[in-house]
Amino acid sequence: MRKGLVFAILSGLVFGIMVFPGLVFSGGPKDGELMFPKGYESFPVFLKEIQKKNAVRDLYINNKGAAAHKGDAFPDGTQLVMAIFKAKAGADGHLVKGSDGKLVKDKLAKVYLMEKSGGWGGNAPANLKNGDWIFSAFSSDGKRIEVDYAKCRSCHLPLGASKDFVHRYDEYFAKKMGAH
């Protein structure tokens, strides 16, 4: 019995090293190596219906991150998800706007994930470190897609540690405070 348990544990460790070598040897995953955040739609809303030129973005934060307070960094284990929807186009090709003047969401195009854990930032390029955040991108069906993560990092970098490198940090906490 005991030999079987030891074998099972060692087999699990070997499997983990083979499947997730970045997690074992380099202090965590690298950009593009995170798992798809299944069920993110049930996460607390960070912000909704952010209007972009040809898209609408909905942002979600997991419960661990939602417990953070303004002025504090988000805790390890925080996941921030950005669901990007194409803006709906009419038969004439022009983008459709609702009665509120906002673009109407069409199909989900991509899902981006930022996830944070202690030491993960060590894998980022020295000039693009965003604390301990790691980025990944997925197609609408949850498959990883290749993107230039330097663009993600360079966009978040100017926000600095005071905003924990998170866009719309102040807007989120103002909304959160107003909800109480």
Image (spheres, rainbow, N blue to C red):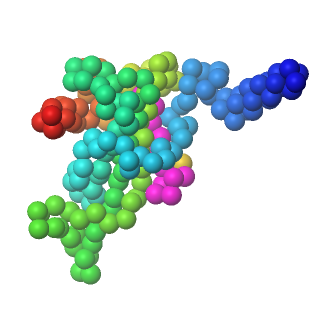
Kindly identify the residue that appears in the image at 30 percent across and 50 percent down: 58
Give the side of residue 153 with respect to residue 89, left or right.
Answer: right
The number of discs equals 0
Give the side of residue 7 with respect to residue 158, left or right.
Answer: right
Kindly identify the residue that appears in the image at 54 percent across and 48 percent down: 144
Q: What range of the chain is rendered magenta?
A: 133-143
Residue 89 higher or lower than 56, as above or below: below
Residue 42 higher or lower than 22, as above or below: below
Residue 131 % position (x, y): 39, 21
Residue 74 higher or lower than 172, as above or below: above
Which residue lies most toward the bottom here? 91
Q: Is residue 157 visible?
A: no
Kindly identify the residue that appears in the image at 32 percent across and 42 percent down: 44
Which residue lies most toward the front here? 1
**Quadrant assignment for the N terminus:** top right
Residue 6 highlighted magenta (yes or no): no
Residue 23 % position (x, y): 61, 26
Kindly identify the residue that appears in the image at 38 percent across and 47 percent down: 42
Q: Is residue 59 visible?
A: yes
**Quadrant assignment for the C terminus:** top left
Give the side of residue 98 with respect to residue 36, left or right.
Answer: left
Most common secondary structure along the magenta stretch: strand
Residue 63 % position (x, y): 37, 34
Residue 71 higher or lower than 109, as above or below: above
Instruction: Report the front residue among 147 and 20.
Output: 20
Q: Quadrant of residue 149?
A: top left
Instruction: Report the front residue among 171 and 144.
Output: 171
Give the side of residue 149 with respect to residue 47, left or right.
Answer: right
